[in-house]
Amino acid sequence: MQRLTRQIFFKQTLFSVALLTCATIAQAASPWMRSEAEGYYWAGLNYSTGEQRWDNSSDLKDTDCRNSDWYMHHKVEYGYSYYYTLIAGLSASSANCGDDSLTEMGDLTLGIRGRLDKYSNGKSWEITTIIPTGYDRNNSSRPGNGRFAIEGGVAWLFRKGEASTSLWSWQGGASIRLWQGPPADQFLSYLSVHRRIATVGRVGVRINGDFSFRNESPEKIKFENRTRLTDFDKLKVAVSWSNHINRRWSYQTSIGHVLWGRNVTNSLIVGVNISHNWNR
Amino acid sequence: MMLSGVFVLFFLNAAIHADEGLNITKENLHQNSEAQWGLSPTSISTIHLNMRPVDADVLFRKDPHDTSSFAVSIKNNDGQLLKGRVKVSGSFTRRFPKKNILIKLDGEQRWQGQRRISLDAMATDGSMQREWLVWQLAHALGVPGPRLQYVRVYINDHYTGLFMHTEWLDSEMMARYKLGADGQFFHPSDSAFCGDFLPHKEKSLKDCWLKLSPRDKDFSPLQILIDGITETPIAEFHEYLEAHFDVESVINWLALNVLTSNGDTYNKNYFLYQSAVSGKWIVIPWDYDLSFGRNWDAHLPFPKNILNDNFQYFYPPELGAPNPLKEKTLRNPLLNQRFIDRMLHLLGEERHGPAATFAWFSPATMRERIYDTANKLRPGRIDDPYLKDSSIDFSQETESLWHYVQRRHAYLREILTGTVPWNPELAIWNPADAPLRPPLTVSLSTSQQIADNGQYSTITAPAYGYLLAAIKLKDTHGAATFSVESEIKHPPAILPPGHDAASCIQRNWFVTLRTPFTSRAVDLQLDYLQEDSQRQELGRGRIEQNLALWMLDGQRWHKLKTHINPLSNVISIDNMTINPSQMLRFVACSESKK
C-alpha cells in the first residue's frame, strides 16, 4: 500500500518533445525511503496529445499540427541503507507532429534520497543528476535538454496511521533543478491527495506546478511551437486509480490535463505504469 | 476460533485404547550448549549489544515496516567481539514499541552456537510466559524445537528490556536432534492462511508454504504428503501416520494446542520437517501468544481482533482452522485414543507415560510453575523501559494464566472423562460449517463435594465443562458439599440498593453450603463471560475495574471485599463464611453507575 501510495502520480506524462524531456524529471522529489536492500522497479508509458499551446506570453494559440507523443520511463530504486536510497532512471520518447517526428533515448538520472526525519518514513530530501545519453544537443530536434543538471528537493507524505488503515493520504514535493547552461533553471512541485477504496485500491488527484526561473537565454528547437525545453511554466491536474496486482506488483492508470502554462502544449495525458518491489 | 462454543454437547467416544507409549527421545533433547543456554528453569542471562548511537536510537522508533539492518557487535563468553547486523523482526509485533530483534553474525561467527540470535520482545504476551510454558512442556514431551532463554538485553549499556532468546529453527537444529540436516523443511506462509494440507485449487503450494531448506523450489515432497493425507481414509489413517510421520510429534502438537486453546494454527504457525534420516515428517509447534485464554475476536477490526481482553477456556479439541491432519488424527479411533491418553496423562487424570510429564498441566503444578517464573521475571520486567508505563498489569496477566489453567483443566477433565465425553464424530471440523450460536441465556447448576486440602476445587457444569465456581476450604473441618448455580446472561433480578441491572454483570450466582451443622470459611471464585465483543456479560457499564460484588444472604445485601481480574473475568472473594443451607445470591455491579 505504501508503495502504491508512493507511486500515485509518480511520473507525469509529457505533451511535447521538450516537455517529454522535462517530464522525465518533472516529478520533483519522492518522499518514500526504501528499507535497506529493498529494490523497487517502476515502468511507465504515457501518451499525450493536443493542438493548442500557451505561448511565451501565456496566450493560448492553435498549433499547426496535433502532437501525438509517447513517453516511456524506467526507474529503479534501491535501499542502500536505512538512511540512503539510491535512484536511477532512464527515459525514451517518441514525438510526432505533422511532418516532424522523433524517437530516441532521453536522459539518464542518478540520485540519492535521504531522511529528513530519522524516525519516520515519508519525509525526505533528494539530490539527482541528469545526464544526457549522447544525443546531439545541437540538433534542434532532440529528446532532452542535452545538458547536465543537478536537482535538489524535499518531499513529504502525510497520513494518519498505516497505509493499510488510513483512508486519506497527502503527498507533496518541491525541488530546484539547476542546468549547466540555458535555457533556464526550474522549480518543480506537486501536491496530491489519495483516498483508499476497498482494501488496497487508491484513487487520487494530483496537481503539478512547474516554473521556470527565466534566468538564461531561451533556445529554439525544431518543436519550438510547443515548448522551449526547460523554459516553461505549467499547471497540470490528473486523477488516477492504483491497485495491487499481487504482493509484489502494482499498477496505476491516470488521466490528466494541463490547466495553464507558458511555452507548453495544452495536452491531454493518459498513462499506465506498473511497479515491482522486492527484498534481497 | 469460530466454534460452536460452550453449549455444544459432546458425546461419548468409544474408548479404544491403543498400545501407547511416550516415544520420547530425551537423550536427543538437550545436547550441546546446555550450559550456555542455561536451561535451568527461568534462568535469566544478559546480552550486551553495541551499535552506533544513531542506529540504536532509531532501531525501535523507525517506521515499523522498515526492514533495514544496522551494524552491531556482541561479546561472546570469551570476551571476543562478534560483528553482525541487527534488525527488527516479526510481522504483527512490529507495531509495538518494544520489538523483536534478529541479529545475524557475519561469516561463520557464532554466539552460543548460533549465527542468528532471535530475541522475542513478548510484546503481545503481557505475562511473558506463554511461549516459555509451551516449550517447557514440549521439551518435556520430546518435541524437537528451539531452546528458549530469558535474556536481559542492553544496547550500548542501556537496559532495553527483557526478551526471550529463541533458538533459530534451521537444519542445524534438526541435525542436533539427529534428524539430519538435509531434510525438507517447510513453514506455512503467515499471510496466506492455507498451509493446512487441504487441496486448494485456487492457490499453489508456493502461495501457501515457504520452503526453508534445501534452498530449492521443489515442493513435490509436500505435494505427495498432501495427496497422501487427502486420499487416506480415516479408518486407515493410523497406518498412514505411522508410515509417514513421527506420530508422537503429531499427537504432541495436538495436545499442546488443545491444552493451551491455541486456535491460531493449523493453517499457519507450525513447521514441517521431513527427516532425511527416517524419511518421516515431524510437526514442530510454533507461536503460542494467542493462547492460554486469549481469543481472536471476529467481530472487531484489526488490530483489536487480536489485541483484546477476551477470555475463553471452553473450546473443544477441534478448535481452529480446518486441517485434515488434525481431523483425521482425532477421528481415527486408535490415534484418538493416543491423543486422549496423552491429554489425561498431562492433566494428571490417568498415567500413560513417564512420571516427568504426568500431571504437568495440573492446576497445582502449573500454579507453582507460573508464579515461580513470574517472580523471577518481575525485576527485569519492572525495569523494562518499554513496559514501565504500559497499561499491562503483570500481576493480573500472571494470575490470568493461572485462572486459565484452573478452568481449562476442569473443562478438559469434564469433556474427556465426564458423563458426556467429547465425540470427534459430532465435532465441527470446519468453523464455517458451525451453526449459528444458540442463545446464551441458560441456567447451569450442580452440587459437588469439596475437600479441605487447601487447594481450589473447580465446580463445573456437567457435560458443558463450564466453570460455575471455584471454592477453597480454609478450615480443616472436613469435606463439604456445595450447590452452585449460574444464571448466564441473566440481568440480576434483585439488585443491591442504588444499582440498576444494566450496570451489572448480566449473571446471577447462587452458592449454598449443603453440609449441615458447621459454617465454613472459604475462598471463592466466580466467573463472568467475555468470550468476545458480542458474547459477553459486561452490561452497559463495561467498566470491569469498578466492579464490586454484592451478596444477598436472604435478608440484606453485603458489599464484599473483592478482587477482580478483568483479563480472566474472575471475581475472587477471600475468607468469607458460609452458613449451612443458606442460599447466597451474588451480583456484580459497577460502582461508577450508582
Image: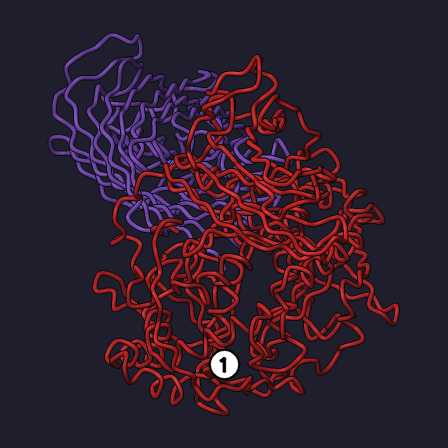
Chain colours: A purple, B red
The C terminus of chain B, quarter of image:
top right
Residue at 33%, 67% in the rendered image: B424
Question: Residue A121: horizontal and vertical position, in percent?
Answer: 55, 36
Q: Is residue A95 left or right of residue B19?
A: left
Question: In this figure, which residue is indicated by the disc labeled 1?
Answer: B248
Residue at 28%, 48% in the rendered image: A245
Q: Within 10 angstroms of label 1, few (less than 14), some, or many (20 or more) residues?
A: many
Q: Is residue A262 left or right of residue A108?
A: left
Q: Nearer the viewer, residue B71 or B234?
A: B234
Badge 1 amino acid: Glu
Q: Say whether residue B222 is visible.
A: yes
* Dot 1: chain letter: B
**SS of the residue at dot 1?**
helix
In the image, residue B335 above or below residue B199: below
Residue at 49%, 63% in the rendered image: B257
In the image, residue A230 above or below residue B210: above
Q: Nearer the viewer, residue B67 or B157?
A: B157
Q: Report the number of discs.
A: 1
- The residue at the far front in this view is B517
Determine the image quadrant of residue B108: bottom right
Q: Nearer the viewer, residue B317 or A147?
A: B317
Question: Residue B8: horizontal and vertical position, in percent?
Answer: 34, 53
